[in-house]
Image (cartoon, rainbow, N blue to C red):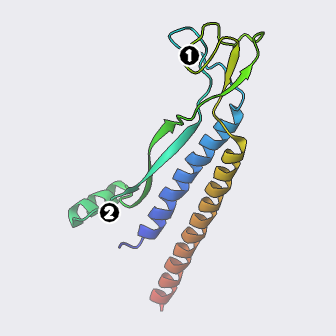
Amino acid sequence: MGFFTGMNISASALSAQKLRLDLISNNIANINTTNTGRTTPEGNPIPYQREVAVFSSRPPQKKFASMFQDARQNLNSEGVQVTKVIEDEASFRLEYDPNSPEAAKVAEPGIPVGYVRYPNVNLVQEMVDMISASRSYEANVTALNASKAMASKALEIGKG
């Protein structure tokens, strides 16, 4: 484990949690977006779909040569990364409003005529996710500060 490994891990987690918070805020902002410009084959509007980040761990490098190469290029070889952003496949909320321009004009599976599909964003779930992401962010800031303090103390010891 290198001198900056702890800092690199915390930094990667900070950027991953920042992206997660950005997705949560985007979900909340689009909680009532019933028309995204996309339509079903029948011509009915498709509402906004909740987006979720998928995390995975970065594998540590095993060979010294590859670690040296990564260090020269300032690449992180350990930590967390966002593998992809996926759309939540939960069902949309339906409301009967035949006067709405977003109401289904043609019946299709899962949506009768006159119903408006609303996004599958649940405000309570988003708030829980936001609290979780912000706490994770805070924990990684604390870990980063601890790594900095240890590095500082090590330099003071070396100063003699």
Residue visible at 70% across and 12% down?
A: 114
Q: Position of residue 102 (x, y in %)?
A: 69, 14
For numbered disc 2, what is the local secondary structure?
loop
> Relative to 5, does residue 50 appear above or below in the rendering?
above
Mark seen at residue 143: none
10 Å crowding of disc 1: few (<14), some (14-19), many (20+): few
Q: Position of residue 38 (x, y in %)?
A: 56, 16
Q: Position of residue 16 (x, y in %)?
A: 52, 51
Mark seen at residue 60: 2
Point out the image quarter for the N terminus.
bottom left
Instruction: Name the side, left or right, on which 73 lies relative to 33.
Output: left
Q: Amino acid at mark 2?
A: Pro
> Relative to 7, does residue 115 appear above or below in the rendering?
above
> Relative to 82, does residue 116 appear above or below in the rendering?
above
Residue position marked by numbered label 1 in the rendering = 38
Residue visible at 54% across and 73% down?
A: 148
Residue visible at 27% across and 58% down?
A: 69
Q: Position of residue 88 (x, y in %)?
A: 54, 36
Instruction: Name the side, left or right, on which 42 lies relative to 98.
Output: left
- Measure the alpha-carbon separation of dots 1 and 2: 41 Å
Residue 97 versus residue 58: which sits nearer the camera?
A: 97
Q: Amino acid at mark 1?
A: Arg
First in sequence: mark 1 vs mark 2: 1
Residue visible at 56% across and 35% down?
A: 90
For numbered disc 1, what is the local secondary structure?
loop
Residue 112 position by quadrant: top right
Residue 74 position by quadrant: bottom left
> Relative to 40, does residue 17 appear above or below in the rendering?
below
10 Å crowding of disc 2: few (<14), some (14-19), many (20+): few
